[in-house]
Image (spheres, coloured by chain):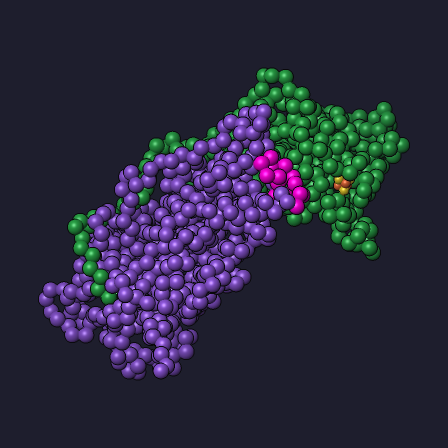
Chain colours: A green, B purple
Amino acid sequence: MTAIDLGLPVLGGLDRVPTEDEVQRAKDFTSDQEVRWCPGCGDYAVLAAVRSFLPTLHIKRENTVFVSGIGCSSRFPYYLDTYGMHSIHGRAPAIATGLAVTRPDLSVFVVTGDGDALSIGGNHLIHALRRNVNLTILLFNNRIYGLTKGQYSPTSEVGKVTKSTPMGSLDHPFNPVSLALGAEATFVGRAMDSDRAGLTEVLDAATRHRGASLVEIYQDCPIFNDGSFDVLRKPDQSESRVITVRHGEPIVFGNEGRYAVVRKGFGLAVAPTAEVAPEDVVVHDATDTELAFALSRLSDQDLQHAVFGVLRRVDRPTYDDLARAQVQHAVQDGTADLHSLLHGTDTWAVQSGNVQIPHD
Amino acid sequence: MASPGSEPVHGSPRKQSRVVIRFAGDSGDGMQLTGDRFTAEAAAFGNDLSTLPNFPAEIRAPHGTLAGVSSFQLHFADYDILTPGDRPDVLVTMNPAALKANLTDLSPGGVLIVDTDEFTKRNLTKVGFESDPLEDGSLASYTVHRVAMTSLTTAALAPLGIGKKEAERSKNMFALGLLSWMYSRPTEGTERWLRDKFAKRPEIAEANIVAFRTGHAYGETTESFAVTYEVSPAALPDGTYRQITGNTALAYGIVASGLRFGLPVFLGSYPITPASDILHELSKLKRFGVTTFQAEDEIAGVSAAIGAAFGGSLGVTTTSGPGISLKSEAIGLAVMTELPLLVVDVQRGGPSTGLPTKTEQSDLLQAMFGRNGEAPLPIVAPRSPSDAFDATLDAVRIAVTYQTPVLLLSDGAIANGSEPWRLPEDGDLPETPVRFATEPNGPDGSFLPYLRDPDTLAVPWAVPGTPGLAHRIGGLEKADGTGNISYDPANHEFMVRVRQAKIDGVTVPDLDVEDPDGDADVLVVGWGSTYGPIGAAVRRLRALGHPVAQAHFRYLNPFPANTADVLRRYRKVVVPEMNLGQLAFLLQGRFCIPVESITKVAGMPFGAAELAERLTPLMMKEEVSA
Ligand code: SF4
């Protein structure tokens, strides 16, 4: 039997979610629970950004769901007055998949961290991405295990000295954006916890994208990995490192566009704009898979460069839409009848049967 | 016990009350298919029946080896039978390996039908026969029919012009035709079935039909098969019947539960033997609003089902023991969040990967205790293939009534075995839609997600999208009522106890005791698929004059309220199980009543005779010393 072509229209990420006409505010999305992250934790900034961003979606608050795993950032759902589930370590993408497949009327967010999503839950993350389930995944990357008090994580730089690696960590870290692209993600973005405008812009695009959107958020853990992203924050150092991309715009950065991204071999390189012909400056195209991957490779563990913005955004039918369409297609067939299912094709009748019980 | 084949009688078929037939061959010989089809013929004829497929875990074990032997045993009768039969009366063997692996099981004086073409020197040596058993007199105590099945089949198919390999593959239909003739089975059904099965390849359908007819004609015309047998339809309770396997019945039970409780079904599952057929079956039933999700792993399967349950679906996950191990933490989350969930464990031989295609009941304690913390959940076990339908409905009823995950413990014997099923009448499955929470239940219009129903202690099922009821659930301990995170010692103490009390308070029917003469002083209790063997063994003991009663647990957690009373009534309580005594351990721990344990972990069900023999010494009253 060949697969049935379900011919689905292209939709936005929120297209089946009921809209809200009343004006909503950040405080409407704020639960009565006291926020309990450490003072100075980057999670506060993200929470504030999300609380003020959610009202701008104009969707029903009760149709918004946050599902998280385990870790500091996974406390997130408790602090939002929406539906939420603080689940078990690494499994949030799988739980959210079941919810998103069965409930097209919900906007489903996953909140996870580098340990949760890339270590214990790596399998679920890549499969949610490849299936393209309509989810918005916020991956808080602080490059450390915070909740368990400071062990290195799968994004920690090689040689990191932590409680569990007194002589320095040995394993090469993941580049979460490269990983997501390798997992066939249709939307991959990155933002900085403290950059409210940039974060909001990427989150907005991610939420409105129909499919699995991965947003890596560089997040500071002042307790166990203090200042890990400082080179991207301090103006004197960030100028030559922070590359922000926008679809359709030439990729230049630094003061007055001092630096430009150019092609080099199969990859990309950074060059002083003054030394590059204008036509050689790469123009960002979020639908170009190779470009997105090459951009992701500009960000290394030493943070020599870090690309922010929407690196990739392409349309591909979502798993949940297809799964529902298959069911609908079958239901419309109109042949669902329990009686005939149970009876099957071969039945026989017994009438006035006297049951004798000879020995067996 | 009747045994066919000793004195040939010409003329009309000889009546038999029951017969056990085993087809055995190489895994590539199509023995499961042959057995299935013979079963369908027996069912269509109205016999009671019970089947036992037995096949290797390897998909294509090396040809002609003992490891590659696959067999299918069918017991059919004119009365209600309980087991697939201990020993075959008729053994069909397609090669020397099948003969070697199965001969010791054949009843003395039994009928042996052999495909002589496969008894080559090479094949005999491969399985360690030093001489040809067909020639050396070692089969003298059986009625042996030497039939060149392979060459008779290829000769009959020669005019069709199909390849030799393809032609040889039809020899199983020759065997089926021969047996169909011997047992006076109707044949139209099989021919129709072959045409349907190979609708896209009519030449293969034709080849199989010709092979089937050739086998049938061979029986009719050859002198060596002078006698045919007849097993009349069984006098079962009135009703409409069909033949069904446990996995199919369980899948249908899930569909019926969805309709009954007004819930869309969501199955999250990962392929695993012997549970995969439930996934296959449900994936064909999307027209009933069933969504099936083949997850990336076992954990994702249960997790997605939990997500669906949070959203208001009937969340289901199906697996076998190794999968339960992987799902344990997530099942604990469902216990903690108090979401309804159906977890199906089709048990197989363990530990670890164990014996994937063989049966065992060794996951009972895992089901009971296999989670961190105090994480109680109800456990329900079907006792036979057809009973899997009702047991599933019951498990789902408990899940949605008490907002809890429920573990349904099937096993390999139930999953792949089949028997007649008396179909429910229309109206036997009243629709009782689940009611979701729609209104705030707390002070000042607040919503308390952990405010319990005073009778069932169930929490409300409040699904996302419901205005005014937004709340957060999770794996951390939650405050009574509000569900907010709470580390308060007294609250934790209360919540642990209330979750336990909820499960302890699940209402289940009393344990029934079968004691026809009312004078038994020994009680044999079991659970799950040992129902048939225990019932058959107990019948034998009663026939020998031993007063013995039988009771069978469908509910293993909580146990029925009358359990202690029932157990105390007997001088001796005996518990046969396919494990090392897990139910015995639970009963002794719970009720402080000593029980005798009879255990078997051979990957195969108890035989009725075997069990009767092991029970016999326990029937004796202890000598009272003067
Ligand atoms: S340990 Fe680090 S990540 Fe966790 S709350 Fe404290 S600062 Fe934030």
At a point 65% along the width and 26% down the height, the residue shown is A29
Q: Residue at x 43, y 32 (%)?
A: A328
Quadrant containing the C terminus of chain B is bottom left
Q: Is residue B341 visible?
A: yes
Figure quadrant of the N terminus of chain B: bottom left
Q: Is residue B179 visible?
A: no
Residue at the spot x=54%, y=23% of the render? A18
| Magenta span: chief secondary structure | loop
Q: Quadrant of residue B131?
A: bottom left
Residue B486: in magenta span:
yes
Residue at 35 percent across and 59 percent down: it is B551
The relative height of residue B23 versus residue B434 in the rendered view (above or below) is: below
Residue furthest toward the front? Answer: B626
Q: How many marks?
A: 0
Residue lying at the far right of the rendered structure: A236
Residue B133 on image: x %, y %: 32, 79
**Percent coordinates x, y for residue B188 in the rendering:** 21, 52
Direction left: furthest residue: B11
Q: Nearer the viewer, residue B168 or A217?
A: A217
Q: Is residue A107 left or right of residue B211?
A: right
Of residues B318 and B199, the one nearer the viewer is B318
Asked if B468 appears above or below B172 in the picture, the reply is above
Examine the rendered structure and indicate whether residue A255 appears above or below residue B93. Answer: above
Residue B566's quadrant in the figure? bottom left
Q: Position of residue B196 (x, y in %)?
A: 29, 47
Spot occupied by residue B171 in the image (x, y as percentages of width and height): 30, 62
Tell me where residue A237 sits by quadrant. Answer: top right
**Is residue B258 part of the magenta span, yes or no?**
no
Report the span colored magenta. Answer: B475-489
Dividing the image into four equal quarters, which quarter contains ligand 1? top right
